[in-house]
Amino acid sequence: MRRFGLRLCLGVGLAFALSGCGYNTMQTQDEAVKSAWSEVVNQYQRRADLIPNLVNTVKGYATHEEQVLLGVTQARAKVGSMQVTPELVNDPAAFAKFQAAQGELTSALSRLLVVSENYPDLKANQNFRDLQAELEGTENRITVARNRYIQTVQTYNTTLRVFPDNLTAMVFGYKPKENFSVDNEAAISHAPTVDFGGAAPAPAPTAPAPTAPATPKP
């Protein structure tokens, strides 16, 4: 009975010690990072799922844009060939490849949307307009998910570097998580715009040029 009581006291004391050294905080923040990463992956997958229908629709009107369409298809295939797991955020090389592949797909989609401006019949197609609007909404959700992930990882990584939490991190093997680079974030922080062929906005009125004061007569 005394041994049980001693073990209980030691267990309670260890729990308080770990809590005071940030162990529980790291556990909570680690789960938050996993949740944020899962949302990033889900939104990227949502975008990838839109691409086949988008490419087929454009192909029906822009048959001469074979290189652009092939670029989108190949970029999507490269993204789809990657094995994306929660552990990817702990592998710098794998995370860099994932980030680069998604960046290539973003660039390919942007070129496709620019090319579509040259085909009025395509722009007027209701299916294309719907897909374009859905793509823009997905890009916005990607941006929101990435920003949440960036902030969550920054919080987690900061905890691992602050004393005495850094000692607990070393004991239990917690490592900083990979994050999106600043250059990459700036490159895709704006979602593609959707032009529904509305009238161009009227130019802003210009102020009249100032007139020279009249010269008084002698």
Image: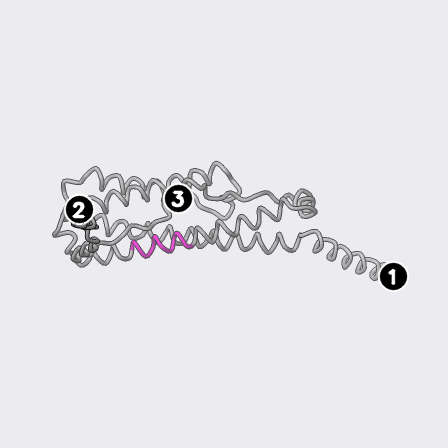
**What colouring does the structure picture have?**
one colour
SS class of the residue under badge 2? helix
Most extreme residue toward the bottom, as rendered?
1
Tell me the magenta residue range.
Answer: 135-144
Q: Are marks 3 and 1 in contact (CB under 8 Å)?
A: no
Quarter of the figure with the N terminus: bottom right
SS class of the residue under badge 3? helix
Disc number placed over residue 59 in the picture, else none: 2
The image quadrant that residue 110 belongs to is: top left
Tell me which numbered mark, 2 or 3, is placed earlier along the sequence: 2
The residue at the point 43 percent across, 50 percent down is 146
Nearer to us of marks 1 and 2 is: 2
What type is the residue that disc 3 sits on?
Ala
Residues at marks 2 and 3, CA–CA distance in whole angstroms:
30 Å
The residue at the point 21 percent across, 37 percent down is 67
Most extreme residue toward the right, as rendered?
2
What type is the residue that disc 1 sits on?
Arg
Which residue in the structure is indicated by mark 1?
Answer: 2
Q: Where is residue 158 in the image (x, y as percent from the top left)?
A: 59, 47
Looking at the picture, tell me which residue is in the foreground, 193 or 122: 193
Tell me which numbered mark, 3 or 1, is placed earlier along the sequence: 1
Looking at the picture, tell me which residue is in the foreground, 7 or 178: 178
SS class of the residue under badge 1? helix
Which residue in the structure is indicated by mark 3?
Answer: 186
Instruction: Mark yes or no: residue 128 visible.
Output: no
